[in-house]
Amino acid sequence: MVIIDTILGNIQLDGNNFAFSSKFHKRIHKVIFYDNHIYILGGRYGNPDQDKNYKLNDTVFKLDAKGVLLYKIGLLKIEYPIDSKKEETWEASNLDILNGELQLGYARGYRVFADVETGAVLRGEFENRK
């Protein structure tokens, strides 16, 4: 049995409690069960503008069926605007699994496709642009 408590940020797998929010200091936004693994999209608590000490970090976590962390990804450094020579850092704010690949959504319509097994980035693109 799987129980997800989004208020407390706990995941219970076959009676074993995994305190996601306590361990990673993230709120649970989305959970996907895929191929005997658990993929969690975590997010910040509260308004980021109110927390000046907040540091950007990974927001996507892959766990095995026992709750053991296999990898975390989601922090992206990108030159934005394109050809500006200015680098911005973004956190993934959406997560899906399509055609056996992770799809991470970012601000300003950017998405990254990553290998579902390893979390390695395969490619990135702006949505709806040719």
Image: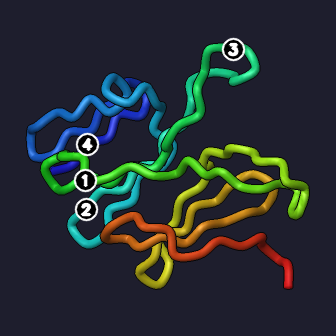
Q: Nearer the viewer, residue 112 or 93?
A: 112
Q: Nearer the viewer, residue 58 or 45?
A: 58
Identify the element where label 3 is drawn. loop
Identify the element where label 4 is drawn. strand
Q: Whole-Å distance between the Cαs marked 2 and 4?
A: 15 Å
Residue 106 in which image quadrant: bottom right
Q: Are marks 1 and 2 in contact (CB under 8 Å)?
A: yes
Q: Give whichever of discs 1 and 4 has the lower sequence position.
A: 4
Q: Within 10 Å of the Cα at label 4, are there few (<14), some (14-19), or many (20+) other Cα atoms? A: few
Pointer 3 residue: 52
Q: Give whichever of discs 2 and 4 has the lower sequence position.
A: 4
Q: Position of residue 9 (x, y in %)?
A: 37, 30
Q: Give whichever of discs 3 and 2 has the lower sequence position.
A: 2
Q: Whole-Å distance between the Cαs marked 1 and 4?
A: 20 Å
Identify the element where label 1 is drawn. strand
The disc labelled 3 sits on which kind of residue?
Lys
Residue 32 in which image quadrant: bottom left
Pointer 4 residue: 3
Q: Quadrant of the C terminus?
A: bottom right
Q: Nearer the viewer, residue 87 or 13?
A: 87
Identify the element where label 2 is drawn. strand
Q: Within 10 Å of the Cα at label 1, are there few (<14), some (14-19), or many (20+) other Cα atoms? A: some
Pointer 1 residue: 70
Q: Nearer the viewer, residue 47 or 31?
A: 47
Q: Within 10 Å of the Cα at label 3, are there few (<14), some (14-19), or many (20+) other Cα atoms? A: few
Q: Position of residue 85 (x, y in %)?
A: 85, 54
The disc labelled 4 sits on which kind of residue?
Ile
Residue depth check, mark 3 versus mark 2: number of the one nearer the observer: 3
In this picture, is 109 found above or below 24?
Answer: below
The disc labelled 1 sits on which kind of residue?
Leu
